[in-house]
Image: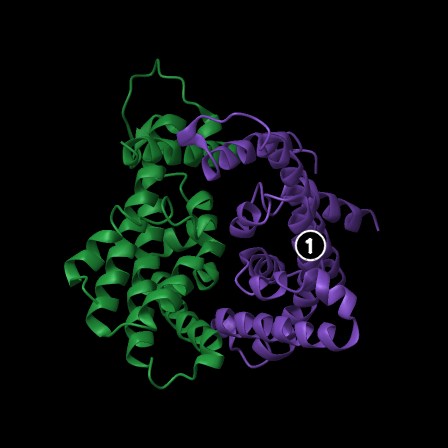
Chain colours: A green, B purple
């Protein structure tokens, strides 16, 4: 392992930023990003699960037999998702209500399982922690950016504050289902354009 | 009877699980490049989703609700679905090898398909009875298959076109999905 801890952390922020570079875990990306607040909230919840599951998987990597590893990963992830669910019910009930079904669905988010399988199962604690944190922050940034763009264009406001005068005609299309696909597609295109220079 | 038909139409078109609820998008983009894989995935989802719907409903009603363990819903559902998929795979391999050859590689992928888990959670959240669960699971699965197969048809045509370089692959796929979602959007307000 020539890569340093900083590199493991940084790669999640640009080189392998989910969901743009690693096209995984698209469901919450499309489903909850109608506003920036929802996007960031979902991102933080996912980051928590990602970091905790990476830590535990990495610590248990010598104990878990590789034949039943996927089942073990799923149980570890589901446990942390339940923790997040209960925490959000207690401390952020409004957000819990808006995100709804997408909170329990972090269990089947391919990014979390993907990092456990591809990284944490093969690496010691500290790099796994850095990897989980980097990926989680990258995911939060992407969700926040997508949510921000959709909120600004779709409702003309950001965090609920109106940005433009009353003459602004919002593109309601952007906050509806089709807008999510088109917006993500265009952002992916822009990323490719910048990245390939 | 009319209620069930309305529920079915609602689940297939209006609340289409892929294009309106955004569940199961990873396999949607991953397996839609070829018609063959799309059909395989659609069949596997129909098969598993109906069974998972029934089993999770039974788990919820007779175990979780009875003993007031609702907070274990996430863990128990994912375990039930994962073991169901494993079991179905073993059963098909032994008894119906033809079907196994067709669905084979798609079955393990279904465990992490949020369409299955999502549909089960929706059924339970809306407090459907057994028949409603059956109808909605089947309709969600049909809606998934319909959208996936339509999308695969469109994507096969895109292969023949010249797409600008930055837009290639996933990017154009997402924009196409947006347009497809727009057509399903027209069903809104029907039920």
Which chain contains the residue that carries disc 1?
Answer: B
Determine which quarter of the picture holds residue A125: bottom left
The vertical placement of A60 against A180, above or below, is below
Q: From the viewer's side, name the closer residue of A160 and A35.
A: A35
Which residue sits furthest top? A167
The vertical placement of A173 against B119, above or below, is above
x%, y% of residue B73?
Answer: 52, 71
Determine which quarter of the picture holds residue A93: bottom left
**Is residue A98 toward the left or the right of residue B93 in the image?**
left
Q: Assign a secondary structure to mark 1.
A: helix
x%, y% of residue B39?
Answer: 70, 50
**Is residue B7 toward the left or the right of residue B18 in the image?**
right
User: Would residue B50 be seen by someone viewing this image from the given angle?
Assistant: no
x%, y% of residue B68?
Answer: 53, 78
Q: Which residue is mark 1?
A: B40
x%, y% of residue B100?
Answer: 72, 67
Q: Residue at x 33, y 58 (%)?
A: A45
Q: Residue at x 27, y 53 (%)?
A: A12
User: Would residue A75 be seen by someone viewing this image from the given angle?
Assistant: yes
Q: From the viewer's side, name the closer residue of B10 and B143.
A: B143
The vertical placement of A191 against A127, above or below, is above
Which residue sits furthest bottom? A63
The vertical placement of B76 against B162, above or below, is below
């Amino acid at each position: 392992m020539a890569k340093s801890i900083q590199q493991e952390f940084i790669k999640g922020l640009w080189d392998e930023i989910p969901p743009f570079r690693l096209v995984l875990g698209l469901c919450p990306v499309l489903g909850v990003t109608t506003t920036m607040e929802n996007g960031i909230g979902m991102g933080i919840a996912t980051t928590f699960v990602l970091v905790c599951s990476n830590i535990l998987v990495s610590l248990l990597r010598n104990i878990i037999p590789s034949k039943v590893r996927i089942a073990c990963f799923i149980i570890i992830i589901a446990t942390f998702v339940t923790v997040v669910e209960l925490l959000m019910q207690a401390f952020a009930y409004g957000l819990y209500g808006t995100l709804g079904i997408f909170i329990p669905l972090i269990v089947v988010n391919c990014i979390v399982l993907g990092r456990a399988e591809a990284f944490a199962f093969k690496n010691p604690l500290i790099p796994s922690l850095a990897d989980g944190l980097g990926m989680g922050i990258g995911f939060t940034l992407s969700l926040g950016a997508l949510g921000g763009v959709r909120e600004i264009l779709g409702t003309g406001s950001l965090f609920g504050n109106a940005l433009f005068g009353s003459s602004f005609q919002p593109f309601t299309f952007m906050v509806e289902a089709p807008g999510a696909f088109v917006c993500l597609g265009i952002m992916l295109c822009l990323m490719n354009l910048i990245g390939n220079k | 009877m009319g209620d069930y038909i309305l529920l079915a139409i609602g689940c297939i078109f209006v609340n289409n699980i892929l294009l309106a609820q955004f569940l199961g998008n990873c396999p949607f983009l991953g397996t839609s490049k070829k018609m063959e894989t799309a059909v395989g995935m659609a069949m596997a989802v129909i098969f598993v989703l109906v069974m998972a719907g029934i089993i999770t409903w039974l788990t919820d009603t007779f175990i979780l609700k009875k003993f007031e363990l609702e907070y274990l819903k996430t863990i128990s559902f994912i375990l039930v679905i994962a073991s169901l998929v494993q079991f179905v795979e073993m059963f098909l391999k032994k008894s119906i090898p033809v079907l196994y050859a067709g669905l084979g590689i798609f079955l393990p992928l279904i465990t992490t398909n949020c369409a299955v888990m999502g549909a089960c959670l929706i059924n339970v959240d809306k407090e459907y009875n057994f028949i409603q669960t059956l109808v909605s699971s089947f309709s969600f699965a049909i809606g998934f298959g319909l959208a996936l197969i339509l999308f695969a048809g469109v994507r096969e045509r895109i292969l023949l076109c010249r797409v600008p370089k930055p837009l290639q692959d996933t990017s154009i796929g997402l924009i196409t999905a947006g347009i497809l979602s727009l057509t399903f959007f027209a069903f809104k307000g029907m039920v």
